[in-house]
């Protein structure tokens, strides 16, 4: 295909604004998929994506329309995958911005527009769901004009569900988006915007050829990881894999390689070939670092090897997943895994339980901390249990985020109160039509457990939230330990700011009292910082009435039997071991 006839574009939107539905209609109208094979959310191939109604893995697809080759990338909309989205945008020249005509502009819409503008893309604004009774086309059009500085006539009004107005979107793609600008005679460079592991074929790369071309059988090299492989097959997705002899400049497609893991071919890396070797990589590559960590333990220790194998298989197709073995005196052997965010963690947990039939205990999610020791050494810890002795520590730094919340103006006060309660600092407040954009910064650890749920509660479901990591700051942080029956439980330890440690300790021991079953002896639940206890709750013992068999007689008989019972309970307390249920380890996630 001539370069002037190629158009590469993606669809960006907030969650649930109709991205995948619009992609379905485009595939139908261009005849890429026949009516018989059509199903909703066609590009969302995982069961989890269909159930949750979200896109987790991006998917490219090639369409033919009036002599033009249109390459579409359906991107994920969630904040956890924003690096993937930024790489997908780099592979395109244009973006369709979908905005729900009933909901208007949301936080993720803004975040994706900023990414698209940073990548210098042509943006085609589209109002979706205009057929709904709740649609307010004029108000939302005004928001879009305010955001992009475009004209009313530039905004396309469609209903992706019924297909009304969708052909105009294809015409706009052909007219407004520029063809790719690459040189076919330059050394070959292709951008990897996604990669996954196929059990039967090895690692498959989704790439955009920027310069030169890649042929079947070429020896390929990744410039960032220096991994070598062979292009066993190249082609395009329409939407199934369609092999072709080569991938020309400007085209988007796939390469089947003989690599064994996606760690050798990461998102954002540059592919080159031996016969036309490039030395300078494409800009923008970064090593994605997880910043949410959680311990995964099998309910039965016999399943530990199965868990380890399952995580190794998953990590082959998810290069952002990092893991290391972990051992807990209470939970036994397990694995500590790093994630990009809470949604990423949720998806991995569900996949492990569904696809590999594992019963898991997941500990409270935490973030990583940077520690400077007295001898000048820098240490990174991923769990509070790994904290060095306090006497050796000079300072502890925790990650902070820059966040943006978009809410209707009625809820500004409640949202600012919520930010302050999480030790956050409000930085800026601006207005887009009837909505307010609140910019703030806050420590990541305080937002991990239920910030999003609380935001939805205080804004009646209207608030939307987006964030990015801004850096690490030194704070007055302490480690809060928890004791059950005078035994420390490492898996429950958490890092907290000194000002919040008392209330956190009280709250956790109160929740533990609800989930740990009563024993035949009294059990003390305590929270401590170092050697000082800051909170305590007692689980009272079951009391068996040992005097029921006595009738009449002297009171000393009754005292004798009760003294014997007390003696037995004392001995049991000394030898008794408390059975801690798995719910105790996710007690932080439990809402009041």
Image (cartoon, rainbow, N blue to C red):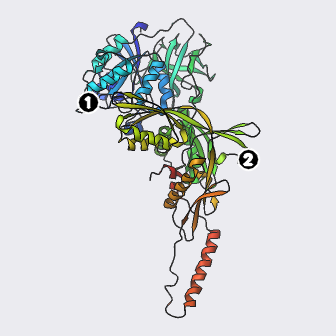
Q: Is residue 78 left or right of residue 365?
A: left
For residue 92, above or below residue 82: above
**Labels 2 and 1: the sequence-earlier one:** 1
535 in relation to 549, above or below: above
Say which residue label 1 marks: 135
Which is closer to the viewer, label 2 or label 1? 2
Location of residue 10 (image quadrant): top left
Residue 319 image offset from top left, x and y in percent: 56, 31
Identified at 77% across, 39% down, the residue is 375
Q: Which mark is residue 471?
A: none
Residue at coordinates 47% horizontally, 9% vertically from top-left? 181
Camera-nearest residue between 506 and 202: 506
Can residue 85 be seen at all in this image of the molecule? Answer: yes
Between residue 520 and residue 271, name the one nearer to us: 520
- In this rendering, would 204 be left or right of 134? right
Q: How many marks?
A: 2
Foreground pick, 462 / 385: 462
Can residue 351 be seen in the rendering of this structure?
A: no
User: Residue 391's mark?
Assistant: 2
Dot 1 alpha-carbon crowd within 10 angstroms: few under 14, some 14 to 19, many 20 or more:
some
> Farthest residue in the right direction?
375
């Amino acid at each position: 295909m001539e370069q002037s006839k190629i158009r590469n574009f993606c669809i960006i939107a907030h969650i649930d604004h109709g991205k995948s539905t619009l992609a379905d209609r485009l595939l139908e109208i261009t005849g890429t998929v026949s009516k018989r094979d059509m199903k909703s959310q066609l590009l969302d191939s995982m069961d989890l994506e269909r159930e949750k109604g979200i896109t987790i893995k991006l998917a490219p697809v090639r369409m033919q329309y009036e002599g033009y080759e249109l390459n579409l990338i359906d991107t994920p909309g969630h904040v956890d995958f924003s690096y993937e989205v930024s790489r997908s945008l780099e592979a395109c020249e244009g973006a369709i911005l979908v905005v729900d005509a009933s909901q208007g502009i949301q936080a993720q819409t803004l975040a994706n527009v900023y990414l698209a503008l940073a990548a210098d893309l042509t943006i085609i604004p589209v109002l979706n769901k205009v057929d709904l009774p709740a649609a307010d086309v004029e108000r939302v059009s005004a928001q879009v004009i305010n955001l992009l500085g475009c004209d009313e006539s530039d905004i396309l009004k469609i209903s992706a569900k019924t297909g009304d107005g969708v052909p105009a979107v294809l015409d706009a793609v052909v007219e407004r988006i520029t063809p790719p600008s690459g040189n076919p005679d330059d050394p070959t460079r292709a951008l990897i915007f996604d990669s996954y592991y196929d059990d039967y074929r090895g690692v498959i790369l989704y790439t955009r050829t920027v310069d030169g071309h890649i042929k079947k059988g070429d020896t390929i090299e990744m410039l960032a990881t220096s991994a070598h492989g062979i292009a066993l097959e190249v082609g395009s997705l329409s939407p199934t894999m369609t092999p072709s002899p080569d991938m020309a400049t400007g085209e988007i497609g796939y390469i089947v390689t003989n690599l064994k893991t996606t760690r050798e071919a990461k998102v954002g890396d540059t592919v080159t070939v031996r016969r036309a070797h490039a030395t300078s990589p494409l800009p923008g590559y970064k090593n994605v670092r997880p910043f949410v960590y959680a311990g995964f333990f099998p309910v039965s220790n016999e399943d530990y090897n199965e868990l380890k194998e399952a995580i190794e298989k998953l990590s082959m197709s998810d290069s952002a997943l990092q893991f290391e073995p972990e051992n807990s005196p209470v939970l036994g052997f397990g694995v500590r895994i790093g994630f990009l965010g809470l949604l990423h963690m949720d998806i991995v947990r569900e996949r492990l339980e569904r696809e590999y039939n594992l019963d898991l205990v997941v500990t409270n999610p935490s973030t990583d901390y940077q520690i400077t020791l007295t001898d000048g050494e820098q240490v990174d810890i991923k769990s509070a249990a790994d904290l060095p002795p306090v006497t050796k520590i000079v300072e502890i730094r925790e990650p902070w985020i820059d966040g943006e919340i978009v809410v209707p103006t009625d809820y500004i006060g409640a949202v600012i109160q919520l930010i302050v309660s999480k030790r956050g600092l409000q930085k800026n407040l601006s207005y887009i039509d009837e909505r307010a954009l609140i910019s703030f910064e806050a420590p990541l650890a305080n937002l991990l457990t239920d910030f999003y749920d609380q935001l939805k509660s205080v804004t009646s479901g209207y608030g939307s939230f987006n964030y990015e990591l801004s850096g690490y700051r030194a704070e007055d942080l302490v480690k809060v330990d928890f004791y059950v029956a005078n035994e420390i439980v490492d898996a429950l330890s958490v890092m907290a700011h000194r000002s919040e440690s008392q209330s956190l300790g009280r709250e956790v021991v109160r929740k533990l009292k609800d989930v740990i079953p009563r024993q035949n002896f009294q059990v003390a639940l305590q929270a401590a910082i170092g050697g000082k206890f800051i909170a305590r709750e007692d689980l009272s013992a079951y009391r068996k009435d040992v005097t029921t068999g006595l009738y009449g007689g002297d009171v000393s008989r009754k005292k004798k039997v009760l003294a014997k019972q007390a003696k037995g309970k004392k001995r049991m307390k000394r030898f008794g071991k408390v059975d801690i249920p798995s719910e105790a380890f996710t007690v932080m996630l439990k809402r009041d």
